[in-house]
Amino acid sequence: MNPPDLLPFAAFGGDWPAYEAELHRIFVAEIANGGVRYEGLRVGCRRHPEAARRWASFWHLVQEGSVEDDRLPDLRRCERIRWVRWVIENAVAHAEIDVWQNTRGTQVNTLLWFREEYLVVLGQRQGYWLLRTAYCTEKSGRIAQLRKERDAFRRANP
């Protein structure tokens, strides 16, 4: 069982507005309004703060950066937009998706990590999950940090 095909920017002939429009269409149809569920509960998306009439969750799936107003498109995130739903829906049954929890401040997150390549982060809420972000894990330091966190969680929760 493999993830959906990538959606490369090159397929849009370098036309960023057309590419972004297709990414947004997929986000709305397959993720925000797609009935995505994890462990029997729906997965919701964060709407605010909106930018350019697009939900905050959309931007966190296609852009990178720690300062909200300075985030930039990340083509690796963009081309994997369809992986978000696939990872969530296959996390429990797919041997190549590692699942564990972490806590950031008072927030408990569930991390779904496909082949140590692509990470989806869900926040636990009362009666549903919140899609916090998803991104490629390509930096060796970040991969090592995630491995350490995952392995520690597994040791503590056999």
Image (cartoon, grey):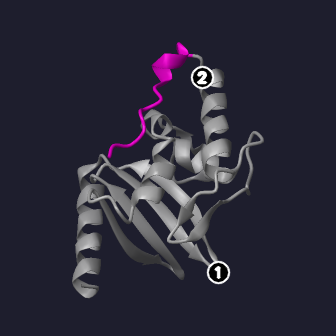
Look at the numbered discs 1 and 2 and tell me whether their residues touch, using CB distance below 8 Å.
Answer: no
The residues bearing labels 1 and 2 have C-alpha atoms spaced at a distance of 37 Å
Q: Residue at x 45, y 39 (%)?
A: 80
Q: Residue furthest right?
A: 53
Q: Dot 2 lies on which element?
A: helix
Q: Residue at x 39, y 61 (%)?
A: 91
Splitting the image into 4 quarters, where does residue 22 fall? top right
Residue located beneath label 2 in the image: 16
Q: Residue at x 67, y 59 (%)?
A: 46
Main SS, magenta residues: loop
Going from N to C along the chain, the mark reached first, 1 or 2, is: 2
Q: Dot 1 lies on which element?
A: loop
Splitting the image into 4 quarters, where does residue 96 fall? bottom left
How far across and down, in percent of the image, does residue 18 sit? Answer: 64, 22
Residue located beneath label 1 in the image: 126
Q: In the rendered image, which quarter contains the C terminus?
A: bottom left
As drawn, is 65 to the left or to the right of 6? right
Q: Amino acid at mark 1?
A: Gln
Q: Residue at x 36, y 72 (%)?
A: 100
Residue 46 highlighted magenta (yes or no): no
How far across and down, in percent of the image, does residue 148 sit? Answer: 23, 70
Q: Is residue 156 above or below residue 94?
A: below
Q: What span is colored magenta in the figure?
A: 1-14
Number of numbered discs on residues:
2
Q: Amino acid at mark 2?
A: Trp
Q: Nearer the viewer, residue 74 or 112?
A: 112
Local packing at callout 1 (Cα closer than 10 Å; few below 14, some 14-19, many 20+) is few
Q: Residue furthest top?
A: 13
